[in-house]
Image (spheres, helix red, strand yellow):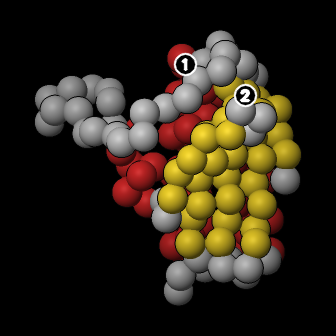
């Protein structure tokens, strides 16, 4: 699946399409939730900080789902994420992505790439 995202309505529609396809493919509900959370965090950051638009690609490969998000402005995230303080209103997105994903990397063409394992 490939999506072009330029606002939050498009993001919401793309995430709904992604989840519907996973459900049709019998992906377990917990993995669908994990993928939606990861994609939501990456896309929200891309829209907010990355120039207001993003390309979003999702591929299911065996028992893994690969999520790639490339924002309009190139951004290579830090290798290690940190959770913001308990009273902070922001700063947990990449930390959540890393907690859920099996791995996270960066590719100049595709942007941030996260692998989510499908478990039952």
Q: First in sequence: mark 1 or mark 2? A: 1
Give the residue at the far left of this rendering. 86
Do callouts 1 and 2 mark residues in contact (Cβ within 8 Å)?
Answer: no
Image spot of residue 7 (x, y percent): 70, 23
Is 119 drawn above or below residue 34 in the view shown? below
Up-down relation of residue 61 to residue 8 (above or below): below
Q: Which one is nearer the viewer's eye here, 29 or 49?
A: 49
Q: Is residue 11 visible?
A: no
Write the residue at 69% across / 46% down.
68
On the image, numbered disc 1 is attached to which residue?
Answer: 48
Q: State the SS at label 1.
A: helix
Residue 33: give x, y in percent of width and height: 54, 63
Q: Position of residue 102 (x, y in %)?
A: 49, 64
Residue at 37% in and 57% down: 99
Q: Residues within 10 Å of mark 1 (few under 14, many from 20)?
A: some
52 on left or right of 80:
right
Q: Which residue: 42% across, 33% down?
A: 78
Residue, disc 2: 54
- On the picture, is 115 further left or further right than 3? left
Tell which of 78 and 15 is nearer to you: 78
Hey, which quadrant is residue 44 in on the image? top right
């Amino acid at each position: 699946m490939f999506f072009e995202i330029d606002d939050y309505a498009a993001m919401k529609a793309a995430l709904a399409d992604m989840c519907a396809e996973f459900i049709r493919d019998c992906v377990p509900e917990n993995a669908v939730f994990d993928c939606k959370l990861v994609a939501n965090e990456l896309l929200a950051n891309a829209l907010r900080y990355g120039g207001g638009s993003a390309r979003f690609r999702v591929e299911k490969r065996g028992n893994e789902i690969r999520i790639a998000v490339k924002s309009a402005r190139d951004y290579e995230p830090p290798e290690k994420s940190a959770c913001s303080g308990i009273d902070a209103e922001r700063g947990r997105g990449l930390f959540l992505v890393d907690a859920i994903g099996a791995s996270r990397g960066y590719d100049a063409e595709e942007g941030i790439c996260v692998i989510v394992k499908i478990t039952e």
